[in-house]
Image: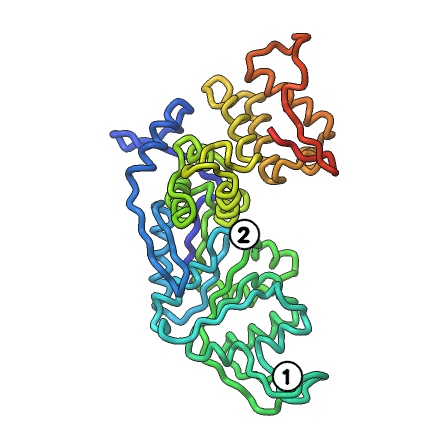
Amino acid sequence: MSKIFHQSDEVTPLRRSHADQTYPIRPDMRHELRQERRHAPEIVYEEFLGMTAVVASPVMRRLVTIASRAARTNSPVLISGESGTGKELIARAVHHFSPRAGRPFIDVNCAAFPEHLMESELFGYERGAFSGAETQKPGLFEAAHTGTLFLDEIGELDSRMQAKLLRVLDGHSYFRLGGSRKVIADVRIVAATNLNLEEAVQSGKFRRDLFHRLDAFHLRVPPLRERTEDIAPLARWFLREAIPGLSDSALTILEDYSWPGNIRELKNCLNKATLCAAGATIEPGDLPVELLLCAELGAQTDTPEKAYSLDGLEQQTICRVLAQTGGHQQRAADLLGISRRTLIRKLKLYRSLERGVKQGDKHLVNPIPVRKHRDDARIVA
Protein backbone atom coordinates (compact mmCIF):
# COMPACT_ATOMS: atom_id res chain seq x y z
CA MET A 1 0.00 0.00 0.00
CA SER A 2 1.25 3.45 -0.88
CA LYS A 3 2.33 5.81 1.84
CA ILE A 4 1.15 9.21 0.67
CA PHE A 5 2.02 12.61 2.08
CA HIS A 6 -0.53 15.14 0.93
CA GLN A 7 -1.58 18.57 2.07
CA SER A 8 -5.05 19.80 1.24
CA ASP A 9 -5.25 21.41 -2.19
CA GLU A 10 -7.50 24.10 -0.74
CA VAL A 11 -5.81 25.59 2.31
CA THR A 12 -7.61 28.19 4.44
CA PRO A 13 -5.30 29.82 7.00
CA LEU A 14 -6.54 29.10 10.50
CA ARG A 15 -5.65 30.33 13.97
CA ARG A 16 -6.20 28.07 17.00
CA SER A 17 -7.99 29.36 20.08
CA HIS A 18 -7.45 28.30 23.70
CA ALA A 19 -10.52 26.10 23.42
CA ASP A 20 -8.83 24.18 20.60
CA GLN A 21 -11.26 25.59 18.07
CA THR A 22 -10.41 27.19 14.75
CA TYR A 23 -11.70 30.20 12.92
CA PRO A 24 -10.60 32.04 9.74
CA ILE A 25 -8.03 34.80 10.01
CA ARG A 26 -9.58 38.26 9.81
CA PRO A 27 -7.84 40.84 7.61
CA ASP A 28 -7.07 43.04 10.63
CA MET A 29 -5.14 40.15 12.25
CA ARG A 30 -2.73 39.62 9.37
CA HIS A 31 -0.09 42.08 10.56
CA GLU A 32 -0.01 40.48 14.02
CA LEU A 33 0.29 36.97 12.57
CA ARG A 34 2.95 38.06 10.10
CA GLN A 35 5.08 39.40 12.94
CA GLU A 36 4.61 36.12 14.82
CA ARG A 37 5.75 34.14 11.78
CA ARG A 38 8.86 36.27 11.31
CA HIS A 39 10.15 35.86 14.83
CA ALA A 40 8.71 32.57 16.10
CA PRO A 41 9.90 29.82 13.71
CA GLU A 42 13.29 28.24 14.11
CA ILE A 43 15.13 28.12 10.80
CA VAL A 44 16.90 24.93 9.78
CA TYR A 45 19.73 24.95 7.24
CA GLU A 46 20.80 21.56 5.94
CA GLU A 47 22.87 20.62 2.92
CA PHE A 48 21.87 17.74 0.67
CA LEU A 49 24.48 16.89 -1.98
CA GLY A 50 25.53 20.49 -2.51
CA MET A 51 22.03 22.03 -2.27
CA THR A 52 21.05 23.89 0.89
CA ALA A 53 17.58 23.40 2.34
CA VAL A 54 16.20 26.44 4.17
CA VAL A 55 13.23 25.22 6.24
CA ALA A 56 11.11 27.14 8.72
CA SER A 57 7.50 26.10 8.08
CA PRO A 58 5.97 23.12 9.91
CA VAL A 59 4.78 21.60 6.64
CA MET A 60 8.30 21.51 5.19
CA ARG A 61 9.77 20.19 8.45
CA ARG A 62 7.27 17.37 8.28
CA LEU A 63 8.04 16.73 4.62
CA VAL A 64 11.79 16.41 5.30
CA THR A 65 11.02 14.05 8.20
CA ILE A 66 8.84 11.85 6.00
CA ALA A 67 11.48 11.91 3.26
CA SER A 68 13.99 10.57 5.77
CA ARG A 69 11.60 7.72 6.59
CA ALA A 70 11.08 6.94 2.91
CA ALA A 71 14.85 6.84 2.45
CA ARG A 72 15.23 3.79 4.71
CA THR A 73 13.70 1.46 2.12
CA ASN A 74 14.66 0.63 -1.46
CA SER A 75 11.16 1.35 -2.76
CA PRO A 76 10.71 3.96 -5.52
CA VAL A 77 9.68 7.44 -4.42
CA LEU A 78 7.40 9.72 -6.44
CA ILE A 79 7.71 13.45 -5.71
CA SER A 80 4.99 15.76 -7.02
CA GLY A 81 4.59 19.51 -6.90
CA GLU A 82 4.46 22.67 -8.97
CA SER A 83 7.50 23.86 -10.89
CA GLY A 84 10.07 25.60 -8.70
CA THR A 85 8.92 24.18 -5.36
CA GLY A 86 12.14 22.25 -4.65
CA LYS A 87 11.39 18.69 -5.80
CA GLU A 88 15.05 18.04 -6.66
CA LEU A 89 16.07 19.11 -3.15
CA ILE A 90 13.69 16.54 -1.66
CA ALA A 91 15.08 13.89 -4.02
CA ARG A 92 18.59 14.67 -2.81
CA ALA A 93 17.36 14.50 0.78
CA VAL A 94 15.98 11.00 0.15
CA HIS A 95 19.39 9.89 -1.15
CA HIS A 96 21.18 11.70 1.70
CA PHE A 97 19.20 9.85 4.38
CA SER A 98 19.31 6.45 2.63
CA PRO A 99 21.80 3.57 3.09
CA ARG A 100 22.98 4.47 -0.43
CA ALA A 101 24.18 7.91 0.67
CA GLY A 102 27.83 7.18 -0.14
CA ARG A 103 26.94 5.85 -3.58
CA PRO A 104 26.27 7.74 -6.85
CA PHE A 105 23.35 10.12 -7.21
CA ILE A 106 22.55 10.59 -10.91
CA ASP A 107 19.88 13.05 -12.02
CA VAL A 108 18.36 13.37 -15.49
CA ASN A 109 15.59 15.60 -16.83
CA CYS A 110 13.34 13.39 -18.96
CA ALA A 111 12.00 16.44 -20.82
CA ALA A 112 15.49 17.57 -21.89
CA PHE A 113 16.11 14.75 -24.37
CA PRO A 114 14.28 13.91 -27.61
CA GLU A 115 12.50 10.58 -27.59
CA HIS A 116 15.12 8.86 -29.81
CA LEU A 117 17.96 9.90 -27.47
CA MET A 118 16.33 9.10 -24.13
CA GLU A 119 16.77 5.34 -24.50
CA SER A 120 20.49 5.61 -25.27
CA GLU A 121 20.98 7.98 -22.33
CA LEU A 122 19.27 5.71 -19.82
CA PHE A 123 20.39 2.32 -21.08
CA GLY A 124 23.58 3.07 -23.04
CA TYR A 125 24.69 1.72 -26.41
CA GLU A 126 27.34 -0.44 -28.05
CA ARG A 127 29.81 0.64 -30.67
CA GLY A 128 28.16 0.74 -34.10
CA ALA A 129 24.62 0.69 -32.67
CA PHE A 130 23.76 3.71 -34.82
CA SER A 131 25.47 6.28 -36.98
CA GLY A 132 28.03 8.15 -34.88
CA ALA A 133 28.27 5.50 -32.15
CA GLU A 134 32.02 5.05 -32.48
CA THR A 135 32.58 3.83 -28.90
CA GLN A 136 30.66 1.94 -26.27
CA LYS A 137 28.79 4.10 -23.76
CA PRO A 138 27.25 2.85 -20.48
CA GLY A 139 23.84 4.32 -19.67
CA LEU A 140 22.73 6.27 -16.63
CA PHE A 141 21.36 3.13 -14.99
CA GLU A 142 24.88 1.70 -14.98
CA ALA A 143 26.33 5.02 -13.79
CA ALA A 144 23.92 4.98 -10.84
CA HIS A 145 24.64 1.32 -9.94
CA THR A 146 24.22 0.76 -6.16
CA GLY A 147 23.05 4.38 -5.87
CA THR A 148 20.04 6.54 -6.78
CA LEU A 149 18.73 7.56 -10.21
CA PHE A 150 16.57 10.69 -10.10
CA LEU A 151 14.18 10.95 -13.06
CA ASP A 152 12.87 14.51 -13.15
CA GLU A 153 9.79 15.33 -15.27
CA ILE A 154 8.91 11.62 -15.42
CA GLY A 155 5.53 12.49 -16.94
CA GLU A 156 7.25 13.54 -20.19
CA LEU A 157 8.43 10.00 -21.06
CA ASP A 158 6.83 8.53 -24.19
CA SER A 159 4.85 5.27 -23.95
CA ARG A 160 7.67 3.09 -25.34
CA MET A 161 10.15 4.34 -22.75
CA GLN A 162 7.55 3.94 -20.03
CA ALA A 163 7.23 0.25 -20.91
CA LYS A 164 11.00 -0.31 -20.85
CA LEU A 165 11.40 1.59 -17.56
CA LEU A 166 8.63 -0.52 -16.00
CA ARG A 167 10.48 -3.71 -16.94
CA VAL A 168 13.68 -2.49 -15.29
CA LEU A 169 11.79 -1.42 -12.17
CA ASP A 170 10.40 -4.93 -11.94
CA GLY A 171 13.95 -6.22 -11.60
CA HIS A 172 14.53 -7.45 -15.13
CA SER A 173 17.83 -7.05 -16.96
CA TYR A 174 18.08 -5.02 -20.17
CA PHE A 175 20.22 -4.68 -23.28
CA ARG A 176 22.18 -1.65 -24.33
CA LEU A 177 21.23 -0.36 -27.77
CA GLY A 178 22.87 -2.65 -30.29
CA GLY A 179 24.05 -5.00 -27.53
CA SER A 180 23.69 -8.75 -27.01
CA ARG A 181 24.78 -8.95 -23.36
CA LYS A 182 22.24 -8.38 -20.63
CA VAL A 183 22.93 -5.68 -18.06
CA ILE A 184 21.66 -5.71 -14.47
CA ALA A 185 21.75 -2.49 -12.43
CA ASP A 186 21.02 -2.14 -8.72
CA VAL A 187 19.38 1.28 -8.69
CA ARG A 188 16.90 3.05 -6.41
CA ILE A 189 14.50 5.18 -8.48
CA VAL A 190 13.28 8.59 -7.34
CA ALA A 191 10.96 10.32 -9.81
CA ALA A 192 9.46 13.80 -9.86
CA THR A 193 6.72 15.50 -11.83
CA ASN A 194 4.77 18.75 -11.93
CA LEU A 195 1.90 16.99 -13.69
CA ASN A 196 -1.08 15.21 -12.18
CA LEU A 197 -0.11 11.66 -13.09
CA GLU A 198 -3.44 10.26 -11.94
CA GLU A 199 -5.16 12.42 -14.57
CA ALA A 200 -2.52 11.37 -17.12
CA VAL A 201 -3.32 7.74 -16.33
CA GLN A 202 -7.03 8.37 -16.84
CA SER A 203 -6.38 10.05 -20.20
CA GLY A 204 -4.07 7.24 -21.34
CA LYS A 205 -0.91 9.39 -21.47
CA PHE A 206 0.82 7.53 -18.63
CA ARG A 207 0.84 3.81 -17.92
CA ARG A 208 -1.24 2.80 -14.94
CA ASP A 209 1.11 -0.05 -13.98
CA LEU A 210 4.16 2.25 -14.09
CA PHE A 211 2.37 4.85 -11.97
CA HIS A 212 1.58 2.32 -9.25
CA ARG A 213 5.15 1.00 -9.41
CA LEU A 214 6.58 4.50 -8.87
CA ASP A 215 3.94 5.46 -6.30
CA ALA A 216 5.26 3.14 -3.59
CA PHE A 217 6.02 6.26 -1.53
CA HIS A 218 4.50 9.60 -2.56
CA LEU A 219 5.76 12.99 -1.36
CA ARG A 220 3.99 16.21 -2.30
CA VAL A 221 6.03 19.42 -2.09
CA PRO A 222 3.62 22.28 -1.25
CA PRO A 223 3.80 25.52 -3.23
CA LEU A 224 5.37 28.57 -1.61
CA ARG A 225 1.99 30.26 -1.12
CA GLU A 226 1.04 27.44 1.28
CA ARG A 227 4.16 27.91 3.43
CA THR A 228 4.72 31.64 3.75
CA GLU A 229 6.85 31.09 6.85
CA ASP A 230 9.64 30.03 4.48
CA ILE A 231 9.62 33.25 2.43
CA ALA A 232 11.60 35.47 4.84
CA PRO A 233 14.42 32.98 5.56
CA LEU A 234 14.64 32.02 1.87
CA ALA A 235 14.83 35.69 0.86
CA ARG A 236 17.61 36.42 3.35
CA TRP A 237 19.47 33.29 2.24
CA PHE A 238 19.36 34.35 -1.43
CA LEU A 239 20.51 37.87 -0.49
CA ARG A 240 23.26 36.83 1.93
CA GLU A 241 26.15 37.64 -0.43
CA ALA A 242 24.61 40.54 -2.35
CA ILE A 243 22.61 42.92 -0.15
CA PRO A 244 22.44 42.52 3.64
CA GLY A 245 19.14 44.28 4.24
CA LEU A 246 15.48 43.68 3.38
CA SER A 247 12.99 46.22 4.69
CA ASP A 248 9.87 45.10 6.54
CA SER A 249 7.64 46.74 3.95
CA ALA A 250 9.39 44.91 1.12
CA LEU A 251 9.14 41.64 3.04
CA THR A 252 5.41 42.23 3.55
CA ILE A 253 4.97 42.48 -0.22
CA LEU A 254 6.94 39.26 -0.73
CA GLU A 255 4.80 37.42 1.82
CA ASP A 256 1.52 38.64 0.33
CA TYR A 257 2.41 37.63 -3.24
CA SER A 258 1.07 34.30 -4.57
CA TRP A 259 4.37 33.13 -6.20
CA PRO A 260 3.07 31.11 -9.17
CA GLY A 261 6.72 30.31 -10.00
CA ASN A 262 7.46 29.38 -6.37
CA ILE A 263 11.06 29.42 -5.06
CA ARG A 264 12.55 29.81 -8.52
CA GLU A 265 10.48 32.96 -9.07
CA LEU A 266 11.38 34.29 -5.61
CA LYS A 267 15.09 33.91 -6.33
CA ASN A 268 14.75 35.59 -9.72
CA CYS A 269 12.72 38.42 -8.18
CA LEU A 270 15.42 39.08 -5.57
CA ASN A 271 18.14 39.01 -8.23
CA LYS A 272 16.26 41.77 -10.08
CA ALA A 273 15.74 43.73 -6.87
CA THR A 274 19.46 43.50 -6.10
CA LEU A 275 20.26 45.17 -9.41
CA CYS A 276 17.74 47.95 -8.78
CA ALA A 277 18.62 48.65 -5.14
CA ALA A 278 20.41 51.94 -4.57
CA GLY A 279 21.50 51.23 -1.00
CA ALA A 280 22.24 48.37 1.35
CA THR A 281 18.55 47.55 1.87
CA ILE A 282 15.94 46.38 -0.61
CA GLU A 283 12.88 48.63 -0.49
CA PRO A 284 9.45 48.10 -2.08
CA GLY A 285 10.38 50.26 -5.06
CA ASP A 286 13.22 47.87 -5.92
CA LEU A 287 10.84 44.93 -6.40
CA PRO A 288 9.44 43.90 -9.82
CA VAL A 289 6.34 45.73 -10.96
CA GLU A 290 4.01 42.71 -10.83
CA LEU A 291 4.60 42.41 -7.07
CA LEU A 292 3.92 46.10 -6.51
CA LEU A 293 0.76 45.92 -8.56
CA CYS A 294 -0.53 42.97 -6.56
CA ALA A 295 0.34 44.71 -3.31
CA GLU A 296 -1.50 47.83 -4.43
CA LEU A 297 -4.64 46.05 -5.59
CA GLY A 298 -4.55 43.67 -2.62
CA ALA A 299 -4.45 46.55 -0.15
CA GLN A 300 -7.77 47.78 -1.49
CA THR A 301 -9.49 44.49 -0.55
CA ASP A 302 -7.73 44.07 2.82
CA THR A 303 -10.69 45.23 4.87
CA PRO A 304 -13.47 43.09 6.41
CA GLU A 305 -16.19 44.75 4.35
CA LYS A 306 -14.36 44.23 1.03
CA ALA A 307 -12.43 41.00 1.54
CA TYR A 308 -15.47 38.84 0.73
CA SER A 309 -17.42 41.23 -1.50
CA LEU A 310 -17.83 40.53 -5.24
CA ASP A 311 -15.80 43.65 -6.08
CA GLY A 312 -13.04 42.59 -3.71
CA LEU A 313 -12.92 39.06 -5.12
CA GLU A 314 -12.78 40.48 -8.64
CA GLN A 315 -9.79 42.65 -7.74
CA GLN A 316 -8.02 39.68 -6.14
CA THR A 317 -8.60 37.56 -9.24
CA ILE A 318 -7.27 40.26 -11.55
CA CYS A 319 -4.26 40.69 -9.27
CA ARG A 320 -3.44 36.97 -9.33
CA VAL A 321 -3.75 36.71 -13.10
CA LEU A 322 -1.56 39.78 -13.66
CA ALA A 323 1.02 38.25 -11.35
CA GLN A 324 0.96 35.00 -13.30
CA THR A 325 1.51 36.84 -16.58
CA GLY A 326 4.22 39.11 -15.20
CA GLY A 327 2.04 42.21 -15.61
CA HIS A 328 1.30 41.50 -19.28
CA GLN A 329 -2.11 43.04 -19.92
CA GLN A 330 -3.10 41.21 -23.09
CA ARG A 331 -2.28 37.74 -21.77
CA ALA A 332 -4.04 38.56 -18.49
CA ALA A 333 -7.13 39.75 -20.35
CA ASP A 334 -7.18 36.55 -22.43
CA LEU A 335 -7.02 34.40 -19.30
CA LEU A 336 -9.76 36.46 -17.62
CA GLY A 337 -11.99 36.23 -20.70
CA ILE A 338 -12.30 40.00 -21.11
CA SER A 339 -10.91 42.53 -23.54
CA ARG A 340 -7.71 44.41 -22.80
CA ARG A 341 -9.71 47.66 -22.90
CA THR A 342 -11.98 46.35 -20.11
CA LEU A 343 -8.99 45.28 -18.04
CA ILE A 344 -7.38 48.73 -18.33
CA ARG A 345 -10.66 50.40 -17.39
CA LYS A 346 -10.95 48.26 -14.25
CA LEU A 347 -7.35 49.01 -13.26
CA LYS A 348 -8.01 52.72 -13.63
CA LEU A 349 -11.12 52.39 -11.49
CA TYR A 350 -9.24 50.57 -8.73
CA ARG A 351 -6.52 53.22 -8.73
CA SER A 352 -9.03 56.07 -8.60
CA LEU A 353 -10.88 54.45 -5.69
CA GLU A 354 -7.62 54.02 -3.82
CA ARG A 355 -6.81 57.71 -4.23
CA GLY A 356 -10.23 58.65 -2.90
CA VAL A 357 -11.26 60.25 -6.17
CA LYS A 358 -14.85 59.83 -7.20
CA GLN A 359 -15.46 58.03 -10.45
CA GLY A 360 -17.13 61.02 -12.04
CA ASP A 361 -14.48 63.63 -11.24
CA LYS A 362 -13.47 65.49 -14.38
CA HIS A 363 -9.96 66.33 -13.19
CA LEU A 364 -9.02 62.61 -13.07
CA VAL A 365 -6.57 62.03 -15.88
CA ASN A 366 -5.04 58.59 -16.53
CA PRO A 367 -4.80 57.54 -12.86
CA ILE A 368 -2.73 54.45 -13.65
CA PRO A 369 0.48 55.25 -15.53
CA VAL A 370 1.30 52.87 -18.35
CA ARG A 371 4.77 52.60 -19.87
CA LYS A 372 4.61 52.10 -23.61
CA HIS A 373 6.37 49.04 -24.96
CA ARG A 374 6.68 47.71 -28.49
CA ASP A 375 3.85 45.25 -27.84
CA ASP A 376 1.98 47.96 -25.88
CA ALA A 377 0.76 45.30 -23.53
CA ARG A 378 2.83 45.52 -20.35
CA ILE A 379 1.78 47.61 -17.39
CA VAL A 380 4.08 49.44 -15.01
CA ALA A 381 2.27 50.74 -11.96
Secondary element under disc 2, as helix, strand or loop, is: loop
**Position of residue 71 measured from the top left corner of the image (x, y, whole percent):** 37, 66
First along the sequence among labels 2 and 1: 2
**Position of residue 15 measured from the top left corner of the image (x, y, whole percent):** 34, 32
- Choose top left, top right, bottom left or bottom right for residue 139: bottom right
Do we see residue 213 in this rendering? no
Look at 71% across and 36% down and name the residue there: 373
Look at 53% across and 50% down and name the residue there: 82
The residue that mark 2 highlights is 83
Position of the N terminus by quadrant: bottom left
**Measured along the vertical axis of the image, is residue 81 above or below residue 309?**
below
Residue 228 versus residue 65: which sits nearer the camera? 228
**Position of residue 46 measured from the top left corner of the image (x, y, whole percent):** 33, 57
* CA–CA distance in space, label 2 to label 1: 33 Å
Do we see residue 84 in this rendering? yes
The residue that mark 1 highlights is 177
Amino acid tagged 1: Leu
